Amino acid sequence: MPPLIDESKCIRCGLCAEICPLGLFRFDKASGNPPEVAFPDECWHCNSCVLDCPKKAITLRVPLCQMLLHRDVRQLYDAGKE
Amino acid sequence: MLKITQFFETDVLVVGGGIAGLMAGIAARDQGADVIIAEKADTRRSGSGATGNDHFLCYIPEKHGDDPRLVLHEIADSMLGSNMDADIAMRFLNESFNVVKSWHEWGINMRLHDDWTFMGHAFPGRPRIFLKYDGHNQKAVLTREAKKRGARLLNHHPVLELIKDENGVAGALALDVSSPEPAFTLIRAKTVILATGSGNRLYPSTSTPGMLFNTGFCPGCTAAALALSWRIGARLVNMEIPFRHAGPRYFTRCGKATWIGMYRYPDGKPLGPFVTKATRELGDITGDVWNTSFTDLMCNGRGPAYMDCTQDAPEDLAFMREGMASEGLTSLIDYMDANSIDPGKHVVEFGQFEPFLIGRGVEIDINGQSTIPGLYAAGDVMGNFRADMGGAAVMGWISGKEVAAACANRSLISAERAESDAWLNERLAYYGSFYERKQGAGWKDANMALQQIMNDYAAVGPHRVRSGSLLSAGLEYLRQLREQAVAQLSTPCSHTLMRATEVLDLMDCGEAVIRAAMERKESRGLHQRADFTFTNPLLNNKFLEIWREDGAVRMNWRSKRQ
Ligand SMILES: Cc1cc2nc3c(=O)[nH]c(=O)nc-3n(C[C@H](O)[C@H](O)[C@H](O)COP(=O)(O)OP(=O)(O)OC[C@H]3O[C@@H](n4cnc5c(N)ncnc54)[C@H](O)[C@@H]3O)c2cc1C
Ligand code: SF4
Ligand code: SF4
């Protein structure tokens, strides 16, 4: 779920795991694996990991229930004319 | 049994390395005190200011004139004003410009367009009090400044408990969450500054009830300072007066003043009378003044309410996008880009968020000291003053200076005495039991149960009421929940143990809220009593203090300091 790590870009530096304000990742340098997203549903979607990753290997997937409710403005003004 | 594996001693222990905590650490080091900052996550990116902010409340004489009271009046009329002791506010104002100048020197851009520029959160024709700045790098800069001065940073160390002796506060117990296996750290300190930020996850998310972490402020901030203070008998204040922020739905995120646009009904009519066109200088302050508008419109069927930036000048739209990056809203920008949401073409629905604890909490004096000697508090945790980012930076700075001076007259508790402290050992066993219990309830169960109880029995307006019978039922259900949680919680690793302690902290805060709400036998703001529907003028200038003493809960009404 929320942060997705592109394993081909990740250099296993562990920075995302250090800085995440919610402590979502688990990182074991010795394993040679990228950090594991151990607690995905605790993501605040703050973007810290995305901003700090030196390889731009992380993207956020915002859950569907957090969709941003929006409308084309013409729907508003057309409603005003009715 | 889980053991203490690390021991530290220091003059000043700062709990929480957010904005207030880092500023406190910097100021105390500047005065020569020895400083440890214990932070739950990592100070480079933690707390509500993790990725940025863009409005800093302050008084700059060359812009506002010689009388800081002018700014004080604007605060009183703003959404920050209700819980304020004026003596603290005046000290804040008088020291704010120095902090602003330091930040600029350190490399946080406080002078957009090469001048002190005040924008947003303002009424037409009135003084503007929010300095517009670019805070995208604020946490990295403050961390660097704290380290440069020799403050010791203990990242990944949430503080779980305070200890005290006959002279006041004496230190703290922290949990080491840097590896999955939990361990404890004991920090003996002459003084402690609590700076753990706001209290989130006490009420269910209004927009997305199933989501514990979709909050306006940082969901890792769970009012630890309030709970720690409560458990060792410091006074809390204004706990019963609720506060709710507003902003976009369903992607909950504060920072509504960064949006340059008009609040509108679905037929395009403006919600408020203040401006006819939003500009970067003014924006539309309706959302601050008529804070409940978004809920009112849903309940009366005239909604939803929209934020409409489509009439902005193109330069203002570009400026807003830059402002969102300064404000730390890059995830929202990325999301909008990825989903082709264009504020120049689309209106975005706004709503009220769930209640949270900010500007109600630890009672402080003009130096930032709580009612326990040596124990200070700064930032969102303060109960009798609130100015968000500016408040955190400046009050952190003030408390850091004060605490360093206070150290001269305070001594360090001895290692033997601290380690054999009965309260400390009781709490070690208590927290350790959740880890040792191999099967049981998860922390999420407990958090959701708490949110249900708060939402049903200590409800927050508009259109929701509290009453004596509801509140006393809530108090009993909360007691039952706590009893069951303590008997059943099972946390297999350091991370889940930390989450469980957050929920237990929130339960203490919930209890203080409910008890204080029972005592406030009137309706005021979002505290709506079905059994006392009026606002009592005799309580206009009164604050309600609540604290624990000798195993009982005490309350006292005191006059607000003018
Ligand atoms: C998106 C957004 C935009 C905002 N924009 C503005 C703005 O423009 N202007 C404005 O005035 N305000 C703004 N705010 C509010 C502002 O960010 C906060 O008021 C400010 O960060 C408060 O500082 P603080 O130090 O009190 O708390 P925080 O900065 O939240 O720091 C608290 C710290 O304590 C740590 N912590 C928590 N519990 C513990 C524990 N038990 N032990 C150790 N550490 C702990 C946390 O990890 C965190 O690092 C905004 C908030 C958000 C979320
Ligand atoms: S910060 Fe980026 S490169 Fe480093 S471990 Fe995380 S994902 Fe990999
Ligand atoms: S977006 Fe923030 S909370 Fe989510 S994983 Fe990244 S750093 Fe952690």
Image (cartoon, coloured by chain):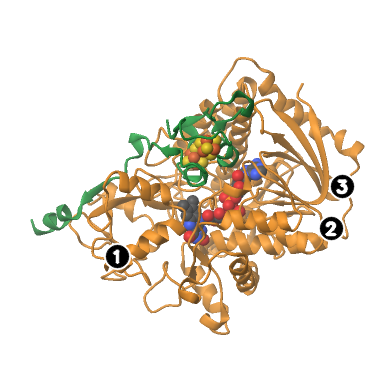
Vertical placement of B98 versus B507: above or below? below
Residue type highlighted by circle 2: Cys
Near-viewer residue (B512 or B380) = B380
| Helix, strand or loop at mark 1 | loop
Taking the spot 38% from the left edge, 38% from the top edge, the residue there is: A62
- What shade has chain A been given? green
Q: Quadrant of the N terminus of chain B?
A: top right
Apparent side of residue B143 relative to residue B206 in the rendered image (left or right)? right
Q: Give the spatial CA distance, label 3 vs label 2.
A: 16 Å
| Helix, strand or loop at mark 2 | helix
The orange-tinted chain is B
Front label number (1 vs 2): 2
Q: Give the spatial CA distance, label 1 vs label 2.
A: 51 Å
Q: Chain of mark 1?
A: B
Lower sequence index among marks 1 and 2: 1
Residue under label 3, please give it: B166
Residue type highlighted by circle 3: Glu
Residue type highlighted by circle 1: Gly
Which residue sits furthest bottom?
Answer: B66
Label disc, if present, on residue B407 of the rendered structure: 2
Lower sequence index among marks 3 and 2: 3
